[in-house]
Image (tube, rainbow, N blue to C red):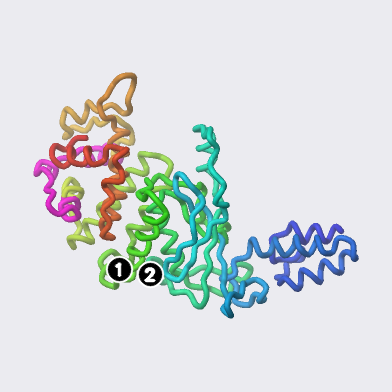
Amino acid sequence: MRDVWAMAVCKPGVSAGGDVLGVGDHSKMIGRCCGEDGFNNAIAFAVRQVQCYIDPVAFGNLPVDMATTIRGKRVRRLNLVNISLIDSEYFPPFEVDRYVFHSRTAPTMRRPLTYTSAMMRRSVRQNHPNAYVEFDGCQEDSRLFSGACTIEAFSYRRIRKLKIIEDLLLLGSILTGMNWALESRRSYSNYPTTGSNKLTCVVDSWRELVELLQKISCKIKNPEWLSRFSDGFHLKVLRNNANIQNMEARFLSHTMLWEFMCARLFGPEERIQSKVVPRVINELWPGIVCNEALEKLNVFQMLRNQLTHAGRLPIDRKRAEDWMKEIPVSKFGDDRRSSLVDYMDFFGHLTQIAVLKTLDLDVSEKLQAFDFPKRFRSFVEGGRI
């Protein structure tokens, strides 16, 4: 039975000797290693291991057992992780771009009545395999990762292009603040290390999420939009930034994202850093005109210069105004003044909303809980929050 155990615990789809195995090969191996007793249990366990971990799309020569046949069509399945909203992991099946998403969570399952902060921290630090997606036929190539390829598992010679499912998972991550991903990518360097990211969920229900996904999935297929924004480079950068745990490093990465949007919206790169944020706001929010003083000096420019050149807070630059130097790093006691932490949080929300504005989505009102509309008006009019 040692060989049976070695075969079962080794990477699914690979024998203890390193050979690629199909379901039938697993059956033969178990049959040779054990007799009639326990054969059915052993084969059932081995097949479950293979079906759980092998990505059916990553292999072109899998046996038919690895795919489901429904109504005469061969339906393939991909396992997903972190497909959830804040209040629920269960969702009814929905379809986007011929992909049908299904939840693994039972409808009757609910979060515990007592949900402590420690429980929440443990939950967001883990990847949860809680969904899968089914499709039939050939997949479209990715638009946002145009030309990007992945090397097939167990075969370093076969290279496949990324498919549009990668685009949908990227968009879902930006809308929900969760790191949507293929479970089969867990051995790749870009596989998420945590279940959630630093973005804010901007949808209230699964119905709204499906509507937005269907809308922006059409938008990213527009050749003009792809050309204007370099195949959605800012979307990929936003998700990467959202997985930076350090707040100061995340803020600096966001400033680079604004420079990219400014260059793509107006052509040549803006040499004066203070003009980047006001120009982008004036372009993405028609009817809102930033205070002219912001193009000469604004708090985000000073905060960027402070972190870039000094690497410490609070702001003490010579060109900074007095009120900027008086902003505390964080709040203490009954101090109600906005701190630099508040400014960096606001800038993160502003960046997420600005990126979604390039997709013709305005979700500013979704951030009422963070006083975003009030802070946004205050910044546009006077440069403070």
Q: Residue furthest left?
A: 292
Residue drawn at x 80%, y 60% is 41
Q: Is residue 291 left or right of residue 216?
A: left
Q: Quadrant of residue 330?
A: top left
- Reading the image, the residue beneath label 2 is 143
Q: Label 1, label 2: how many angstroms apart (C-alpha)?
A: 8 Å
Check if mark 1's residue and mark 2's residue have beta carbons within 8 Å: yes
* Residue 120 x, y percent position in the rendering: 50, 37
Q: Depth check: give the residue in front, 116 or 20.
A: 116
Indicate yes or no whether the magenta region holds residue 249. Answer: no
Label 1 packing within 10 angstroms: few (<14), some (14-19), many (20+): some
Which amino acid, by three-letter code, is at mark 1?
Leu
Q: Residue at x 21, y 33 (%)?
A: 317
Residue at the top extreme of this rendering: 333
Q: Specify whether 125 is left or right of 328.
A: right
Looking at the image, residue 236 sits to the left or right of residue 154; the answer is left
Is residue 240 something that shows in the picture?
Answer: no
In percent of width and height, residue 45 lies at 75, 60
Image disc number at residue 226: 1
Q: Secondary structure at mark 1?
A: helix
Q: Is residue 298 magenta?
A: yes
Q: Looking at the image, is 370 positioned above or below residue 338?
A: below
Magenta portion: prevailing SS class: helix
Magenta span: 279-308
Q: Residue at x 51, y 71 (%)?
A: 135
